[in-house]
Image (cartoon, rainbow, N blue to C red):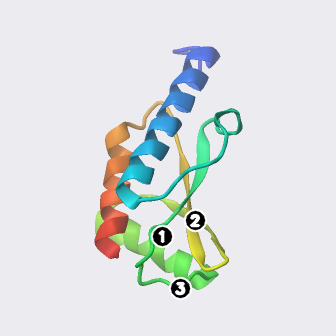
């Protein structure tokens, strides 16, 4: 914040999270319906169907471990609800759009 200023950081993170959602939606084939004004620097996105993990707390924990150990990706499968695992993604100044492409590639490889 000190280096870039709060406004620049917030605008960057908001733009990046919207781009990240678009990349993941395109690669993982889902439609994101959360209004732009409700998305600042974090979002929940559905994991694609076909993952070998049940939509339970244990399943989402196994997904988190596999992403870290097999792909060196730190991601938070934050929620398992109604037959679906949801990934919590965030955007920060140190993230790049390729990070979200790598996440999508890793998740799809696990399917």
**For the point 54% across and 76% down, which residue is it?**
61
- Within 10 Å of disc 3 (Cα), the crowding (few <14, some 14-19, many 20+) is some
> Considering depth in this image, is 49 or 71 the residue closer to the camera?
49
Q: Please tell me whether mark 2 or mark 1 is closer to you in this view.
A: 2
**For the point 61% across and 80% down, which residue is it?**
83
Q: Earlier in the sequence, mark 2 or mark 1?
A: 1
User: Would you name the residue on which mark 2 appears?
Assistant: 86
- Tell me which corner region of the image, top left, top right, bottom left or bottom right, holds residue 66: bottom left
User: Would you name the residue on which mark 3 appears?
Assistant: 54
Residue extending furthest toward the right: 38
Looking at the image, do the residues carrying marks 3 and 2 touch, with CB atoms under 8 Å apart?
no
In the displayed structure, would residue 2 be above or below residue 91? above
- Tell me which corner region of the image, top left, top right, bottom left or bottom right, holds residue 84: bottom right
> Considering depth in this image, is 60 or 69 the residue closer to the camera?
60
The secondary structure type at the circle numbered 2 is strand
Locate the C terminus and report the quarter of the image it occupies. Answer: bottom left
Q: Earlier in the sequence, mark 3 or mark 1?
A: 3
From the viewer's perspective, tell me whether residue 85 is left or right of residue 70: right
Calculate the distance from the C-alpha at mark 2 to the C-alpha at mark 1.
11 Å
Q: Which mark is residue 64?
A: 1
In the displayed structure, would residue 5 be above or below residue 27? above
Q: Please tell me whether mark 3 or mark 1 is closer to you in this view.
A: 3
- Tell me which corner region of the image, top left, top right, bottom left or bottom right, holds residue 56: bottom right
In the displayed structure, would residue 12 be above or below residue 29? above
Calculate the distance from the C-alpha at mark 3 to the C-alpha at mark 2.
12 Å
């Amino acid at each position: 914040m000190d280096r870039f200023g709060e406004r620049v950081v917030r605008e960057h993170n908001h733009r990046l999270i919207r781009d990240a959602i678009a990349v993941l939606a395109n690669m993982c084939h889902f439609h994101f319906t959360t209004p732009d004004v409700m998305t600042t620097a974090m979002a929940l996105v559905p994991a694609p169907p076909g993952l070998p993990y049940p939509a339970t707390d244990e399943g989402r924990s196994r997904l988190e471990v596999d992403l870290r150990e097999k792909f060196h990706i730190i991601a938070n499968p934050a929620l398992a609800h109604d037959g679906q695992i949801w990934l919590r993604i965030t955007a920060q100044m140190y993230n790049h759009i390729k990070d979200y492409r790598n996440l999508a590639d890793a998740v799809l490889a696990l399917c």
